[in-house]
Image: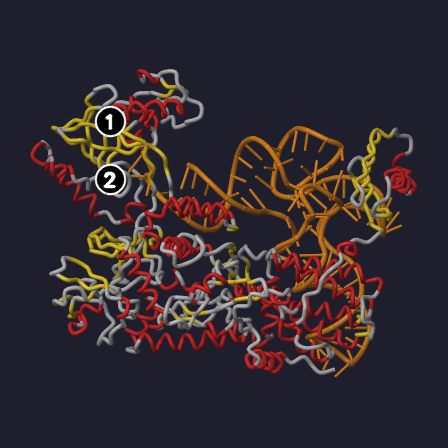
RNA sequence: GCCGGAGUGGCGGAAUUGGCAGACGCACAGGACUUAAAAUCCUGCGGGGUCAAACCCGUACCGGUUCGAGCCCGGUCUCCGGCACCA
């Protein structure tokens, strides 16, 4: 027997697959299509870590299995290569980011090839390739033309270290997601995308998708729909509009609060008696960073506006108006009616500043705390609402407000528009020019795309955070495509999320220079059948790309309203010490070494066997060795193969059971138990001391998706026909997965006391008589009367006796 | 605080969804082979108890439903992930 040498063997098959274009795919209407997608990596300078191959191996197993089952499988790979780390590396080492990207991609690609994934490399895409970002820019132009891209001066989350504005989604605990620096607020003019216009569609679309529940709820929470009403209060001759989810508590509104940024404050300047105090508070609130807002104890602060009072429209009472930073300008109307009896924040505020608290929903104890239950309370102190339930009161008051013309139903979302511009070099240039004469931003004609990134002297952002492109006078100066007059180019670039928002479409037709993909390719391959990725992308990439796709669908460009039919998620791999892998902890496992020492097949098997796919799990070197042992034991089976074509009689049931288990477990991403079943079957072969050709063939096929190299080698050595990757996935006979005789437990009073061997479909009389014939059972039942007898065929016998 | 998810041997983890708890793997112990070690093969491996058995206890904790509960119900604790002054 040839010794098992993973190094030469794996190289050999990787080369054959390449030469044979084994995994290249084209449109083929004679087969069902299957589009398997994994998140394309950012090619960092560190290369792959052992976390990357986990989802890749998982989808590779499913892709390989589906091919064997007769599907036309699209399983592509590419590079999400724009972004800050590359740019920072370029600045530090004075190398062009494109060069850095090229090197990193080459390294990643060779590492992926080393692991034997069945990607169709002819469809490789790279977001930094002009022939790719031409279409990223094109999609932006469509958004711009439909009014969904607009420029606005907003307070952006500013990272002083990265010198870049961040989207809300990129701020974690008030700090920059990437570098951890506390985020500051800066007023900046930014490109924005109106994702809010799609808020409802993004919720509704989830309904029919096969996404894991966590992803659905996280997206729904992030979008944050709430139903309530807008109500107009009169104040100093103006209408002060508020949003509330509790219009039923209107009689309990004892004061109002405006956000410090509310524009009315400037308008009321002359009438406000304590304007100095108000201004002081406004500047104090402005200086608070996001970090301080989240970290500081939520002690309420605020100032009463003196000289102006509001009128509660429902009872004509005059109530004071305060300003406080617990009211946000960016949600609702920037002003609220405060009902301290029934809102915990208002309650805290009222207690601190000694404001009146009026109970309008009975059922709690407002001496102690705000009563916020909406299920059980009854309306009191509320005029015509008295005696109603909260739900009825809501309806009644909104009706009344509508009749009076001072309020109406309103739905709000927490979702904000997407801050789309970055003041950085290594991103897609935004293809618009500013033209004084035309009075604003003008889209570049589509035939001028791609708008290439110009060569610059320095990739460093300007001192005030302006884009490095702003220094490129020659490039910035241009002519307006509409009027032909002088115009200047936009110097901001797009965020990293742009290129990844549509890459799965490009894979369908990656070389098309007429459209982002042909109609034919789009209609054949859409939607992605199965997309696996990290939970960390739930509210970023996954939401953004669903938004773009829904927009493209509305424009008639893509054929399906949703991009991804199914979404699953993998767990992280921790270091051997149970900590998150990081350079500073020194617990990083390098896949190159694992593959060199044990081989790609072992590495792949271990990554799948490590534990439940969706959960985090610590790496274990001895665990890897266990999988290597499995591979070698399978290898040694070749000396035990008999000439028999079918299954041997005593293993027939085991064979069918294992085929079934592996088929179903792989599809359900229960790789650990699927592999465990294969190990158990191997143990049976060893116990028997032989394996038939028929058994060997099926066994290799079942292992092949997980460990494709050595199974291909053994297939060849044993003289099976063709390539294993082209062979047909084994089928099982349901009837043969169950053996006729079963061992079932006999319980007395629910405690297992004996095991009997009977027919699977034996009758109750039969089962009980066999059970009672057991000496031990007979002994235990002696002198007792049987109260009840339970028999579940194939499962259990339970005798209750006294 | 709110929304998700989870607590099972020394460890990673199984359990047909209410039917023999601990599959499979790791670690460990004993044995075989070897001059020896490694590798490999065989055996054992939740705790108590016994010469061995019988038997008792055991799935975070307290209680309940059931012939029978890791799984269902009520309550408590702990951990992980997400959101967080969103009116």
Which percent across, then down, holds residue A129? 36, 73
Residue A483 horizontal/vertical position (percent): 14, 64
* A500 left or right, relative to A695: left
> Distance of mark 2 from mark 1, alpha carbons?
30 Å
Assess disc 1: are there few (<14), some (14-19) or many (≥20) residues with their C-alpha within 10 Å of its C-alpha.
few
Residue at horizontal 42 percent and vertical 48 percent from the top: A219
Residue A183 visible (yes or no): no
Q: Label 2 is found on which chain of the structure? A: A
Report helix, strand or loop for mark 1.
Answer: loop
- Which residue bears the numbered disc 2? A325
- Residue A333 seen in render: yes
- In the image, which is nearer the foreground, mark 2 or mark 1? 1
Residue at 81% across / 35% down in the picture? A790
Above or below, B4 relative to B41 = above
Residue A167 marker: none
Alpha-carbon neighbours of circle 2 within 10 Å: few (<14), some, or many (≥20)?
many
Above or below — where is A475 with respect to A311?
below
Q: Which residue is drawn at the image coordinates 17% and 62% (left, top)?
A: A434
In the picture, the quarter occupied by the N terminus of chain A is bottom right
**Quarter of the image where the C terminus of chain A is located:** top right
- First in sequence: mark 2 vs mark 1: 2
Q: Residue at x 39, y 24 (%)?
A: A390
Q: Is residue A348 left or right of residue A708?
A: left
């Amino acid at each position: 027997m040839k010794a098992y040498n993973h190094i030469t063997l794996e190289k050999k098959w990787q080369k054959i697959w390449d030469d044979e274009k084994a995994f290249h795919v084209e449109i083929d209407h004679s087969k069902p299509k299957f589009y398997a997608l994994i998140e394309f990596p950012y090619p960092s300078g560190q290369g792959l870590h052992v976390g990357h191959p986990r989802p890749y191996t998982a989808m590779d197993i499913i892709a390989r299995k589906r091919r064997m089952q007769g599907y036309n499988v699209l399983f592509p790979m590419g590079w999400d290569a724009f972004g800050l780390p590359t740019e920072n590396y370029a600045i530090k080492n004075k190398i062009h980011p494109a060069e850095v990207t090229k090197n990193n991609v080459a390294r990643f690609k060779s590492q992926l090839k080393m692991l034997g994934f069945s990607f169709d490399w002819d469809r490789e895409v790279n977001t930094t390739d002009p022939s790719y970002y031409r279409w990223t820019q094109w999609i932006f132009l469509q958004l711009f033309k439909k009014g969904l891209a607009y420029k606005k001066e907003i307070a952006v989350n500013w990272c002083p270290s990265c010198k870049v504005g961040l989207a809300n989604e990129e701020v974690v605990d008030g700090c920059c997601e990437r570098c951890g620096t506390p985020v500051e607020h800066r007023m900046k003019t930014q490109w924005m995308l109106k994702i809010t216009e799609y808020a409802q569609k993004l919720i509704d679309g989830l309904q029919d998708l096969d996404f894991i529940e966590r992803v659905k709820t996280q997206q729904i929470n992030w979008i944050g729909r709430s139903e309530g009403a807008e109500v107009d209060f009169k104040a100093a001759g103006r209408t002060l509009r508020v949003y509330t989810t509790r219009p039923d508590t209107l009689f309990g509104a004892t004061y109002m609060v405006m956000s410090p940024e509310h524009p009315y404050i400037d308008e009321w300047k002359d009438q406000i008696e304590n304007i100095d105090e108000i201004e002081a508070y406004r500047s104090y609130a402005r200086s608070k960073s996001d970090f301080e807002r989240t970290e500081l104890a939520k002690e309420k602060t605020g100032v009463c506006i003196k000289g102006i009072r509001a009128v509660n429209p429902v009872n004509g009472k005059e109530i004071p108006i305060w300003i406080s930073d617990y009211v946000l300008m960016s949600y609702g109307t920037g002003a609220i009616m405060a009902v301290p009896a029934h809102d915990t924040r208002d309650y805290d505020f009222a207690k601190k500043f000694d404001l009146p608290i009026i109970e309008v929903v009975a059922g709690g104890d407002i001496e102690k705390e705000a009563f916020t239950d909406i299920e059980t309370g009854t309306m009191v102190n509320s005029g015509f609402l008295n005696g109603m339930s909260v739900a009825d009161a809501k309806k009644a008051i909104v009706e009344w407000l509508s009749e009076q013309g001072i309020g109406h139903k309103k739905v709000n979302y927490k979702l904000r528009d997407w801050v789309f511009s970055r003041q950085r070099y290594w991103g897609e240039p935004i293809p618009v020019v500013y033209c004084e004469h035309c009075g604003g931003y003008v889209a570049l004609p589509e035939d001028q795309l791609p708008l290439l990134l110009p060569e610059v002297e320095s990739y460093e952002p300007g001192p005030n955070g302006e884009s490095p492109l702003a220094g490129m006078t020659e490039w910035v100066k241009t002519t307006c495509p509409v009027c032909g007059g002088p115009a200047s180019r936009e110097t901001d670039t797009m965020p990293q999320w742009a290129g990844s928002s549509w890459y799965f479409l490009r894979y369908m037709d990656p070389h098309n220079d007429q459209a982002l993909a042909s109609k034919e390719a789009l209609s054949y391959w859409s939607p992605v059948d199965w997309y696996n990725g990290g939970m960390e992308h739930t509210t970023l990439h996954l939401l953004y790309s669903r938004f773009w796709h829904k927009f493209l669908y509305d424009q008639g460009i893509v054929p399906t309203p949703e991009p991804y039919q199914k979404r699953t998620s993998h767990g992280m791999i921790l270091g051997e010490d149970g900590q998150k892998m990081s350079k500073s902890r020194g617990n990083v496992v390098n896949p190159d070494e694992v593959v060199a020492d044990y081989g790609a097949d072992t590495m792949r098997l271990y990554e799948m066997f490590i534990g439940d796919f969706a959960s985090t799990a610590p790496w274990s070197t001895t665990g890897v060795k266990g999988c290597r042992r499995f591979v070698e034991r399978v290898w040694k089976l070749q000396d035990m193969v008999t000439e028999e074509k079918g299954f041997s009689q005593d293993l027939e049931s085991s064979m069918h059971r294992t085929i079934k288990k592996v088929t179903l477990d792989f599809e359900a991403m229960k790789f650990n138990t699927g592999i465990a079943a294969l190990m158990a079957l191997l143990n049976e072969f060893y116990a028997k001391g032989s394996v038939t050709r028929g058994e060997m063939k099926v066994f290799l096929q079942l292992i092949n998706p997980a460990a494709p190299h050595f199974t291909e080698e053994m297939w060849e050595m044993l003289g099976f026909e063709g390539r294993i990757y082209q062979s047909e996935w084994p089928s099982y006979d349901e009837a043969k997965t169950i053996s006729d005789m079963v061992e079932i437990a006999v319980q007395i009073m629910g405690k297992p006391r004996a095991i009997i061997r009977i027919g699977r479909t034996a009758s109750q009389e039969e089962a009980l008589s066999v059970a009672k014939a057991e000496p031990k059972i007979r002994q235990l039942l002696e002198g007792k009367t049987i109260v009840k007898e339970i028999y579940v065929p194939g499962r259990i016998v339970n005798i209750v006796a006294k």
